[in-house]
Amino acid sequence: GAVVSQHPSWVICKSGTSVKIECRSLDFQATTMFWYRQFPKQSLMLMATSNEGSKATYEQGVEKDKFLINHASLTLSTLTVTSAHPEDSSFYICSAPLGTSYEQYFGPGTRLTVT
Amino acid sequence: LAKTTQPISMDSYEGQEVNITCSHNNIATNDYITWYQQFPSQGPRFIIQGYKTKVTNEVASLFIPADRKSSTLSLPRVSLSDTAVYYCLVGGALRTGANNLFFGTGTRLTVIP
């Protein structure tokens, strides 16, 4: 099956700093990737759609200047949390569809803790 | 805006068959039904997908009635390792704004020894 990786798997940063999270499709190309955020005991919430070679599409209520998304190649999308605050602490998960399939393949997630 | 409804939680004893039903009254003609499993601190994992009638794989079965307004995920002979949250999503091709990008509450299944 399709494999999606994320790096790092967990990160702790100080308030006010920026953190970059990478999402890679390892054995397939992904022109589109999706970024989710999940708080404890809650469901996944879609943040944005990452498009290779063009700007990301953000969901309502997600600050595009705070959550910078770059999809520089067919296998890599990055999410940068800028000027992180404790309320940004969450589990960030990316996913990608395989070709024109209707299912998503998810990365293992990145646990961000802002102190 | 998830358009699916599932029970919030279910308990089952080991070795039993578990059926989780999802309601999707507004499913569109081109929509498929996809189920994911998520363990704590992990990304969701694809379980099964179907369009109509019955689909079976090595992990589960998916039953979809003729009107497609609901679907039932069936897990045979569950074990403790099946304790997880199960999500039902409906939608067509994955694209910006597609319904199958929005997760509902999911069903938290707890398997009891």
Image (tube, coloured by chain):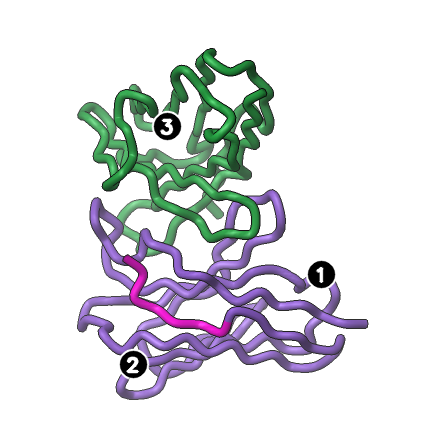
Chain colours: A green, B purple
Q: On what subunit does the disc labeled 2 rest?
A: B
Query: Does residue B91 appear left or right of residue A83 in this picture?
Result: left
Which amino acid lies under the numbered mark 1 shown in the image of this protein?
Ser
Residue A46, above or below B113: above
- Residue at mark 3: A75
Instruction: Determine which quarter of the picture holds residue A49.
Output: top left
How far is the residue under mark 1 from the one under mark 3?
Answer: 32 Å
Query: Does residue B2 appear left or right of residue A41 in this picture?
Result: left
How far is the residue under mark 2 from the one under mark 3?
Answer: 35 Å
Q: Do labels 2 and 3 share a chain?
A: no
Residue B75, above or below A15: below
Q: Position of residue A100 (x, y in %)?
A: 26, 50
* Residue B68: mark: 2
Q: Which of marks 1 and 2 is nearer the N terminus?
A: 2
Which marked residue is nearer to the observer: mark 1 or mark 3?
A: 1
Residue name at image x 27 percent, y 38 percent: A61
Q: Where is residue B37 in the image (x, y as percent from the top left)?
A: 54, 58
Taking the view exactly as shown, the residue that stands out farthest to the bottom is: B66
Q: Magenta stretch?
A: B1-7
Query: Does residue B101 appear left or right of residue A108 in this picture?
Result: left
Residue B26, above or below A26: below
Query: Does residue A15 appear left or right of residue B90 in this picture?
Result: right
The 10 Å Cα crowd at callout 3, few under 14, some 14 to 19, many 20 or more, is many
Q: Main secondary structure of the magenta part?
A: loop
Which amino acid lies under the numbered mark 3 shown in the image of this protein?
Thr
- Residue at mark 1: B81
Residue in the foreground of this view, choosing between A78 and A38: A38
How far is the residue under mark 1 from the one under mark 2?
Answer: 30 Å
